[in-house]
Image (tube, rainbow, N blue to C red):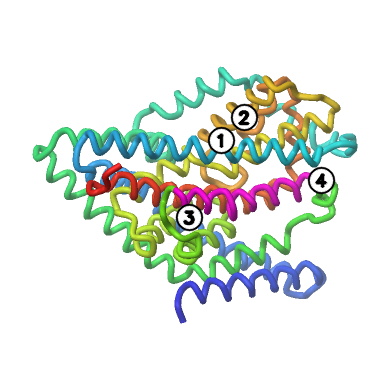
Amino acid sequence: MSLNTQIFIAAVLGIAFGFFLRLYPEFIFFDGSIYTLGIVSGIFIGFLKMLLVPLVFTSIVVGVASLESGQQLGKVWKVTLMCSFTTMSLSLGLGLLCAHIFEVGKGMDVAIFQTAMQQYQNTTQNLDSSSFLTNFVQHTLINPFKAFSDGNVLAIVVFAMLIGLALVYGGKRFQTIRKVNEEFFDLTMMLVEWVMKIAPLGIFALLAKLIAKEDISILSRVAEFAVIVTGTTIFHGLVVLPLLLWVFGRMSPLKFFKGTRVALLTAFATSSSSATMPLSIKSVQENLGVRPQIAGFVIPLGSHLNMDGTALYEAAAALFVANLIGLDLSLTQQIIVCLTAMLASLGAPGIPSAGMVTMIMVLQSVGLPAEAIAILLPIDRLLDTVRTVVNVQGDMMVSVVVDRYTKPETVE
């Protein structure tokens, strides 16, 4: 049985078992089952997180250093930035458009969330756009050894890109260092293959625990917003991104989804683009034919630079909160929301519910109360699964497009 089939079966069984636990909480083994599922899923995620830092560093160093010249590197940068800006702009516009059409959040009662709001008042002060930018820079350009020990992935990405650039322009002087990084990257990918042997069991545990523990009664209070955002995000992932892939990447969407389904399913189960990164790189290289140096550069960078699902969610959530408190945002304010959501998604780490932190910045950019973040807490975990899938899908799609437009033999 192939790994894809094993993961699919594990996902179906995990959802079924989760519903069983939810329907029968008095089941004698309920507490033991939840505890065991937490241990199993924790082991799986722990292995992926353990490999994250070495994989990010070596993949970017090798990816940048393997580019043939500074001119080729510049071309990769330009195409990557252009693709990321295009997809995120489309996702932001789509999110605001659907929120306007369906007037999401109109007439809902905010009073029921007052208790939850009070719990977050202390964490929502003194966080405006300027302070966010300052913190963003201060936490990115730091001692690389501290970044490695703290697991600061974005700082590691910046440092790895600088090392890769030095290897490109240093030429043969640093050939040994380049070779060591290439071998360490191959070693890390071998470890990833070993971890994937327990992927079906880990995904079963993750989905079962998610279904069993999600609070549907609270989720129903904001069902309108959840349905609109989920539907819009799915539309972006199933229509907008595949269309762009077919036009600019010259690849069939069916081939893309078939080759990346393991990574997408893992993204859904883990709600973590960072944890899914090893599978994303592996999928596009082996199944879609993307060059290793392109995949190793674009996907780790895209996990922080290109987050369509997060940007869409944060822009729609800002309009949702405005509707709840009876405010009509002007066109200028909505443009500010879009720009701020794009910047906030750039600074959001690829971990579950990370967008909730940067969501405060989006709200305050147009004067909305930051404590309203509590309104979104009951449904965030569920929505996070869908937007993470689109984030990961966008990264892999961009790698295909970049690979096509940066091949030496391609004549534009």
Residues 221 and 206: in front is: 221
- x, y (%) of residue 200? 52, 71
What's the residue at 56%, 50% (across, down)?
A: 390
User: Which residue is tagged 2?
Assistant: 338
User: Which residue is tagged 3?
Assistant: 276
Q: Quadrant of the C terminus?
A: top left
User: Which residue is tagged 1?
Assistant: 89
Q: Could you tell me if the residues under marks 3 and 4 are in contact, i.e. CB atoms within 8 Å? A: no
**CA–CA distance in space, label 3 to label 4:** 29 Å
Residues packed near mark 1 inside 10 Å, few (<14), some (14 to 19) or many (20 plus)? some
Can you tell which mark lies on residue 227?
Answer: none
**CA–CA distance in space, label 3 to label 1:** 24 Å
**CA–CA distance in space, label 1 to label 4:** 26 Å
Q: Which residues are magenta?
A: 225-247
Above or below for 411 versus 239: above
Q: Earlier in the sequence, mark 1 or mark 4?
A: 1
- x, y (%) of residue 178? 18, 45
Q: Tell me the chief SS of the magenta region.
A: helix
Three-letter amino acid code at disc 1?
Ser
